[in-house]
């Protein structure tokens, strides 16, 4: 079992961008996942395909992983849930992982439990119940319900770390959530997948760091009308996805209205493999948003010192 890591002690907030990409596989970015360590809690927000590999390789105290918060149930946000549970358990986790999410989370968690049930049995049989603690092997689902869609909902409150969920608009995916972390005067907000809604800026208000989704409509439209004419069904999908996401410029407007200090683009889509294309993705953003802009990359880390 790993010793209590430096991250779990002290009063800083540590944030890890494990997966900065969207649903299209590419060599630069795996799908959505952000880790937060604060107040002795280790939490993952979403665990998209490929992201748990990054969690594992950063040598973090995964045996202390306590919770996973899911924003919604698109596969690019949940694909590694089984691996996150299995591998943190194999690394010595002694308590059951709690998986929070909107209505439907129990179905997701039960499905993963079923898929991993045989392996769970093999591991206990092979290593023994004192090494693979049986009650820690099976995750627990916790449904978050939002009582007022115009307000943030406090659902997690431990040792001074408060986490609020808020409803976002990713229709037809309903409900879909974003998360707001508050700890010792610092605020970190993760939008999840959403288009711009009336309340979004309010929910992101005064964030020290906003991890905001954005897909480049310009780049998708260039793909649609470009010389390498994609097949009809891909054209349909590339058009459809623009109605439930934000463009980088729209996201910058939300960040500006919310007086965010640092805006980190995540769910970067379409895949961006060169610097020239990075500029295209960020085109127009600095004219709208006054704060610091970061194009998210896998394994970026952030640290916030306590303000109070
Ligand atoms: Zn989605
Ligand atoms: Zn997504």
Image (tube, helix red, strand yellow):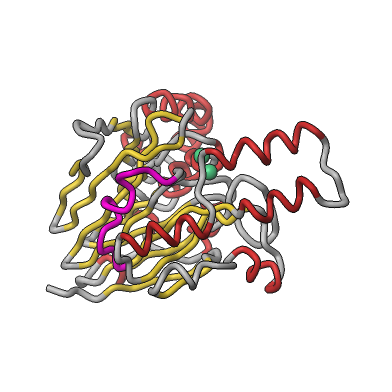
Q: Nearer the viewer, residue 255 or 209?
A: 255
Q: Is residue 216 left or right of residue 196?
A: right
Q: Nearer the viewer, residue 95 or 145?
A: 145
Q: Position of residue 147 (x, y in %)?
A: 19, 31
Q: Position of residue 125 (x, y in %)?
A: 47, 33
For the image, the number of numbered tags is: 0
Q: Residue at image x 41%, y 59%?
A: 253
Of the 4 image quadrants, the one containing the C terminus is bottom left
Q: Position of residue 132 (x, y in %)?
A: 39, 42
Extreme right residue here?
A: 227
Residue 216, quarter of picture: bottom right
Q: Is residue 7 left or right of residue 193?
A: left
Q: Residue at image x 74%, y 38%?
A: 235
Magenta region: which residues?
196-208
Of the 4 image quadrants, the one containing the N terminus is bottom left
Q: Is residue 264 magenta?
A: no
Residue 181, quarter of picture: bottom left
Q: Is residue 224 left or right of residue 102?
A: right
Q: Residue at image x 45%, y 67%?
A: 288
What is the magenta segment's predominant secondary structure? Answer: loop
Q: Is residue 202 magenta?
A: yes
Q: Position of residue 112 (x, y in %)?
A: 48, 30
Q: Residue at image x 29%, y 30%?
A: 143
Q: Is residue 54 left or right of residue 179?
A: right
Extreme front residue here?
A: 287
């Amino acid at each position: 079992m790993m010793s209590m890591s430096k991250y779990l002690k002290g009063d800083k907030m540590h944030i890890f961008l494990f997966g900065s990409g969207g649903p299209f596989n590419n060599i630069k970015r795996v799908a959505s996942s952000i880790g937060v360590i604060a107040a002795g809690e280790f939490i993952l927000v979403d665990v998209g395909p490929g992201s748990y590999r990054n969690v594992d390789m950063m040598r973090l105290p995964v045996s202390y992983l306590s919770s996973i918060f899911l924003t919604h149930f698109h596969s690019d946000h949940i694909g590694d849930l089984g691996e996150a549970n299995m591998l943190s358990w194999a690394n010595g986790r002694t308590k059951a992982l709690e998986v929070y999410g909107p209505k439907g989370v129990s179905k997701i968690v039960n499905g993963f439990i079923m898929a991993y049930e045989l392996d769970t049995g093999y591991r206990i049989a092979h290593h023994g119940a004192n090494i693979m603690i049986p009650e820690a092997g099976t995750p627990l689902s916790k449904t978050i319900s939002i009582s007022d869609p115009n307000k943030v909902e406090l659902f997690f409150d431990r040792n001074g770390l408060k986490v609020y969920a808020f409803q976002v608009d990713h229709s037809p995916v309903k409900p879909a959530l974003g998360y707001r972390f508050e700890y010792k005067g610092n605020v970190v907000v993760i939008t999840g997948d959403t288009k711009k809604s009336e309340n979004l800026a309010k929910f992101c208000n005064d964030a020290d760091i906003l991890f905001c989704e954005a897909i480049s409509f310009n780049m998708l439209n260039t793909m649609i009308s470009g010389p390498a004419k994609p097949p009809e069904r891909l054209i349909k999908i590339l058009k459809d996805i623009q109605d439930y996401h934000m463009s980088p410029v729209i996201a910058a407007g939300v960040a500006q209205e919310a007086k965010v200090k640092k805006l980190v683009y995540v769910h970067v889509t379409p895949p961006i493999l060169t610097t020239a294309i990075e500029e295209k993705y960020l085109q127009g953003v600095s004219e709208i948003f006054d704060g610091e802009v970061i194009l998210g990359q896998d394994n970026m880390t952030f640290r916030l010192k306590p303000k109070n």
